Amino acid sequence: KILETKNEDYVIASDTDSVYITFDKLVSNVFEEGTEPSKIVDFLDKIAKEKLEPFMAKSYTALAKTMNAYEQKMEMGREVIAERGIWSAKKRYILNCWDIEGVRYKTPQLKIMGIEAVKSSTPQVCREKIRDALKIIMSGDEKMLNTFIQEFRDEFMNLPPEDIAYPRSVNGLKKFSSSSGMFAKGAPIHCKGAILYNYLVKKHKLTNKYPYIDEGAKIKFLHMKQPNIYQSSAFSFMTKIPRELDIVDRIDYDEQFEKSFSQPIRFITEKILWKIDDSYGEQGSLEDFFN
């Protein structure tokens, strides 16, 4: 009624037990541009408590009556108040939140779901940098993001291989091992790497210095440059790469950076039509790229 709209959908996303509603038009109608965020958050919090939550409670009571429920058990409450949000896929989103379940923040905090920044399978250094990149996406612009990516790539290319490897648990070593001691067709990438590691440790008679990777072990793995003499796409290890195996120079740092950092960021920027310089500044300046 306040906005004088009819049949307009203010729901921007929903899931099994959650719904996200935009109040952008209402806020623009009530507040002047430049209003302190805390005042807007107070306003939206009041709407949730005094209007939305009572309406939902009333609706659930009606639903329970319709379904002839023994007792009404359904409840919904306000979770977050966010100024921006990006949904890249089902159950994959980031929100720039001023309030999360009643906890108020002086500066907005990210709520991240399903993105590589919160996945334990992503290298730790990349998880931290992905989170930093998401903050730029929420509060900065394309140029700032590309500058950040290029600077991190320079840093990434000089990190020890142990720092940029994917953490995993490995299973199926016996299943995917061939009679030659190498991996069989269809082996998952981290299994290939683990079987190759065991093969090389045995071949170079290093078993007294480096233990075999056993079933269920916690490992790390890295992409290898293609082609290579081992015909493997990956190399796995436990804590440290045996330098005697001459593997470090075969590690594909470019692929590692692309898969562990660039792809997760690109998956988000594509949704908001931002461009990432695929040459990472090697084919010209950022000014040239955006012009």
Image (cartoon, grey):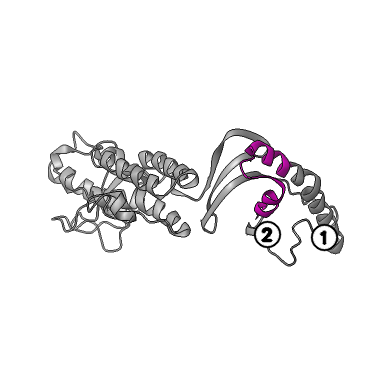
Dot 2 alpha-carbon crowd within 10 angstroms: few under 14, some 14 to 19, many 20 or more: few
Dot 1 alpha-carbon crowd within 10 angstroms: few under 14, some 14 to 19, many 20 or more: some
Magenta stretch, residue numbers: 18-45
Q: Could you tell me the amino acid type at mark 2?
A: Tyr
Q: Could you tell me the amino acid type at mark 1?
A: Leu
Counting from the top left corner in percent of width and height, residue 151 is at 30, 41
Q: Is residue 170 visible?
A: no
Image side of residue 165 versus residue 44, left or right: left
135 in the magenta segment: no
State the residue in front, 99 or 122. 99
Counting from the top left corner in percent of width and height, residue 90 is at 54, 59
Image side of residue 131 versus residue 178, left or right: right
Counting from the top left corner in percent of width and height, residue 247 is at 17, 45
Image side of residue 148 versus residue 30, left or right: left
> For the point 26% across and 41% down, which residue is it?
154
> For the point 27% across and 63% down, which residue is it?
185
Please name the residue that numbered disc 1 is placed on: 63
State the residue in front, 26 or 272. 26
Please name the residue that numbered disc 2 is placed on: 10
> For the point 12% across and 43% down, which residue is it?
204
> For the point 15% across and 45% down, which residue is it?
249
Counting from the top left corner in percent of width and height, residue 14 is at 63, 58
Mark toward the viewer: 2 or 1: 2
Q: Are marks 2 and 1 in contact (CB under 8 Å)?
A: no
Label 1: which secondary element: helix
* Sooner in the amino-acid sequence: mark 2 or mark 1: 2
Q: Quadrant of residue 61?
A: bottom right
